[in-house]
Amino acid sequence: QVQLVESGGGLVKPGGSLRLSCAASGFTFSDYYMNWIRQAPGKGLEWVSYITSSGSNVYYADSVKGRFTISRDNAKNSLFLQMNSLRAEDTAVYYCARDSSSWYLGVWGQGTTVTVSS
Amino acid sequence: QSALTQPASVSGSPGQSITISCTGTSSDVGGYNYVSWYQQHPGKAPKLKIYDVSKRPSGVSNRFSGSKSGNTASLTISGLQAEDEADYYCSSYTSSSTYVFGTGTKVTVL
């Protein structure tokens, strides 16, 4: 079945770095745009970034631009989010999600938790 | 990009209908028919309920329906059931080629 599994979350100090991964299965990964969305504790959803199917174009929310880098490895069916210069306000559950041809997020992973604290 | 505006909470009795609004601008909700709605139960990942303003994915109950007028989209849940108690988020494509989510609405079944 179609599945997305995130990993790589954890506790990191302010200013530190973390790399999240999302393993895809059950569909042709290279056909789809992919996204990262986050949710701070007790807060709403915030779109973070997406990458086109080939990886040639990437887009970021203003809140992470210049600090986060999205990438993908289509040969390994994997999506990544490199997070640098982390701040307390980056503390959240991070979800990867599969895009569609019509700008909606039809498949979501279970999320991985990132905590930025000294 | 500012979040789309949703009411913080909406409630209804079993069997009733409720409507959740989602207000944006001409650069997002009003400019494209790419509004989607997600349901999220506590501790779970969001689940798609409506896409392209009013289309339902396979397997989603026809008790869920969507519409749009100008810069405001709406999600209606008819025949409210206990299992519908959850948080609901709207989302839209934007003129910046990004996504924006709504502020979220907590639905309570009385």
Image (spheres, coloured by chain):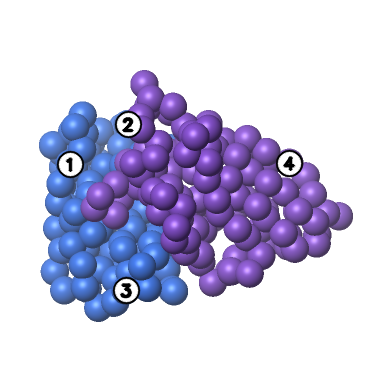
Q: Position of residue B108 (x, y in %)?
A: 36, 44
Q: Separation of disc 3 and disc 1 at Cα?
A: 24 Å
Name the residue carrying label 3. Answer: B95
Looking at the rendered structure, the kind of residue marked 1 is Arg
- Helix, strand or loop at label 2? It is helix
Circles 4 and 2 on the same chain: no
Name the residue carrying label 4. Answer: A10
**Which chain is depicted blue?**
B
- Helix, strand or loop at label 4? It is strand
Q: Is residue B75 visible?
A: no
Looking at the rendered structure, the kind of residue marked 3 is Ser
- Above-or-below relation of B61 to B86: above
- Helix, strand or loop at label 1? It is loop
At 79% from the left edge and 49% from the top edge, which residue is drawn? A12
Which label sits on residue B56?
1
Q: Separation of disc 1 and disc 2 at Cα?
A: 18 Å
Q: Position of residue A75 (x, y in %)?
A: 49, 34
The image quarter containing residue A98 is top left
Name the residue carrying label 2. Answer: B83
The image quarter containing residue B69 is bottom left
Q: Separation of disc 4 and disc 1 at Cα?
A: 36 Å
At 40% from the left edge and 36% from the top edge, which residue is drawn? A29
At 20% from the left edge and 38% from the top edge, which residue is drawn? B57
Q: Residues within 10 Å of mark 1 (few under 14, many from 20)?
A: some
- Along the horizontal axis of the image, is B60 left or right of B6? left
Q: Chain A's shade in the image?
A: purple
